[in-house]
Amino acid sequence: MARSPDSPESVPPPIITLLTDFGAADVFVGSMKGVILAINPHAQIIDLTHDIPAHNIRAGAYLLHSASRHFPPDTIHVAVVDPGVGSERRPLLVTTRSYRFLAPDNGLLSYILASEPKAEVRELTAKQYFLGTVGSTFHGRDLFAPAAAWLSLDEPTDAFGPKIDNPVRFEVRQPQVDEGRVVGEVLHIDRFGNLITNISHTLLREAIGTAELLKVRVRIKNTDVQGLRRFYADAPPKTLAALINSDNLLELFCNQGRADKLVNATIGDQVEVKVA
Amino acid sequence: MARSPDSPESVPPPIITLLTDFGAADVFVGSMKGVILAINPHAQIIDLTHDIPAHNIRAGAYLLHSASRHFPPDTIHVAVVDPGVGSERRPLLVTTRSYRFLAPDNGLLSYILASEPKAEVRELTAKQYFLGTVGSTFHGRDLFAPAAAWLSLDEPTDAFGPKIDNPVRFEVRQPQVDEGRVVGEVLHIDRFGNLITNISHTLLREAIGTAELLKVRVRIKNTDVQGLRRFYADAPPKTLAALINSDNLLELFCNQGRADKLVNATIGDQVEVKVA
Amino acid sequence: MARSPDSPESVPPPIITLLTDFGAADVFVGSMKGVILAINPHAQIIDLTHDIPAHNIRAGAYLLHSASRHFPPDTIHVAVVDPGVGSERRPLLVTTRSYRFLAPDNGLLSYILASEPKAEVRELTAKQYFLGTVGSTFHGRDLFAPAAAWLSLDEPTDAFGPKIDNPVRFEVRQPQVDEGRVVGEVLHIDRFGNLITNISHTLLREAIGTAELLKVRVRIKNTDVQGLRRFYADAPPKTLAALINSDNLLELFCNQGRADKLVNATIGDQVEVKVA
């Protein structure tokens, strides 16, 4: 009998996403996929990105939070940016309302944990879900990949290790609000040179007011931007401009250019918003 | 009962391809995949490339046409190179004899439309197929990805928006033919530095004749190449040479080197072919 | 009736992996995937890497061997690093105990053949498994991709061409062992700048002894390293150090830095190990 892809009796493949700093030029990621498929050949493996700057836990944490939330419930997210691999740092399994996350205990899940205060956090200890020999340099392949594959076969989370209550988290810095003035910072610079800040649309509306928002002055590195644009092509070319981006965050950009180069910006640079 | 992957009753997963200028270092593409799978978890998502040079609509148009035609019928192709995102530019759904294409109305489908004069062109307007909130900066995620996923669930194309007859198309420049002389240009430079031209094997045979083809002289930037090679290793190393490539186009190359660096070539450079 | 992904009657999709030097900026790989899916839309296609340095057969051979062994039995591995495409070099189909490999006959399978002395080697000659027109520049798309897709549909290997006994193999150089001294070389430099050598843990234990291993001195380019570390973070920052890596090979690394830059190392550089 024909099985339609959207018929109710058709079980979709379990989804496992991967986010790492392993790059594309080696076969670290390919090896992880082989390990997953050797345990669950039905898994659908999706790459979030493998080009997190090497060892940059904060960048990985930001991008994991940004992308993971678009996936369907029950997706298993594996994140490996792991300079401490092989040391005493614990491997984690975190269960949120919608997802399971597997990652080293080094802050990589900070944004996830900040937005999911009731998440269940476990230390991954159950060796039956790891490869036979776990080395000390590649837990992505030897530990996180096989554990994710076993999870996708519906093994219960409590079989993977004990609950813990002290996962490593870096401080998720919040913008400072002071009399109609908001001071935040650059969180991320994307492939187009756009500067994504930690200042949300919600915060701006509360601190400054919806009516005043179009008249704000945004300052970064002694450069001022007047007002918010509705979209990229709404700004004059080759000048710094600002808008609310697709993650509801204030973003500085340069139509037909790169904002990061225009003002020589880096992650962590201060961004100030106030009514002009 | 065993379900063989090639048994007639087994419905293959719908295929959705993605071509963008989003790069691999961000999670734009990963977010699009999440949105697609949240609507149709059975979709098989295939990357064509995400390394179109930022905002380069012509390069995207060429590579989309080159790759898309190899896919099985009913494949859904999503292409997003979209400097005008959020402005008045329309989102399109184009149905050809074999495929559906979703793309911004900015010329990205120029080669597709040139080779499919009877294609049906619709403006994507049906908001029920978009994400709940469509922002103004990331239509790949908010609009094209969900529309592609709904299409893959067999929603009828006429539900997505009205037919239009004036999609934006850039001129697909044809080589000039003049008394046994063909003048075209460099369309694309690939990863190996090969220079792909807009001069087809078919045109050369018509303009110059099959018998004469092996004796042609190809000129680019004051450098002459005598005759056509059968394959790359057929040419002496480190010199400019020419052949008919896998897309039936005249291509200049350098065995064990890069043709683009050898003659300092860029896209748009003139290429002349005549009988030596 | 519900079909569980792990129920015994559920046949997993056949897996086809791809390893090439085609890069991500072109659509060579996307075109290969289209060809595969047009023949077998059920195939699960997995990228090992497409960033083998252009034409570097040795790098491709090493990474193919490293990654392929993690995949489940019956995986079909396609490897294309093929500077001689279109020339007389033969296309190969190699069957090992667990896998089938499709690759040009230029040494790319040297490590596979070295570790699988009883592998069956065939020349791919059966044109019914190729695209209708096989060009002379892109056998990845015209020949290897369709042959892999047909193999995944359970066509018998002996239908693809005759057995041969003289595949091209480069010498897999073995380290020299001499009175408690082992001399090998750098096989591969990974994305983090780590130097992977051809000296295995097994060989070191035999040549030097397990007890002495922690006291060895490793020398590369007049720089000495004392002892082996257990993991990367076990070494002081910014200095050269050594460990046994996840492939059981001696690896030189620099915690919080790049070993390749620290000692200006390249592939082929000599590495000496002896008891200090």
Image (spheres, coloured by chain):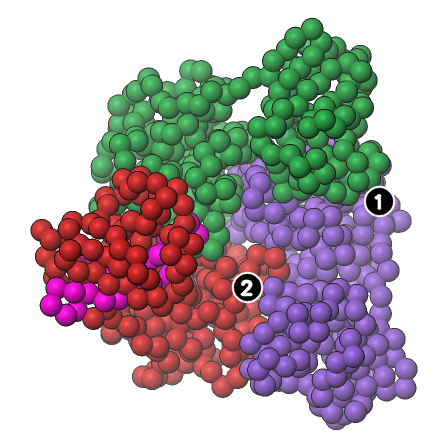
Chain colours: A green, B purple, C red
Instruction: Find out whether the residues at labels 2 and 1 contact each other: C-beta distance under 8 Å.
Output: no
Q: Secondary structure at mark 1?
A: loop
Other residues around mark 1 within 10 Å, as few (<14) / some (14–19) / many (≥20)? some
Residue of label 1: B163
Residue A36 or residue C59, whichever sits in front? C59
Residue A231 in sight in this render? yes
- In this rendering, is residue A12 above or below C269? above
What secondary structure characterizes most of the magenta part? strand
- The foreground one among A234 and C196 is C196
Q: CA distance from mark 2 to mark 1?
A: 39 Å
Q: Nearer the viewer, mark 2 or mark 1?
A: 2
Where residue C122 appears, as percent x and y from the top left, is: 37, 79
Dot 2: chain letter: C
In this rendering, would C124 be left or right of B152?
Answer: left
Q: Quadrant of the C terminus of chain A?
A: top right
Residue C97 in percent (x, y) is at 27, 66
User: Residue farthest to the top?
Assistant: A179
Q: What count of labels does the image hold?
A: 2
Q: State the image quarter where residue B179 is shown.
A: bottom right
Q: Which residues are magenta?
A: C177-201
Q: Is residue C257 above or below residue C131?
A: above
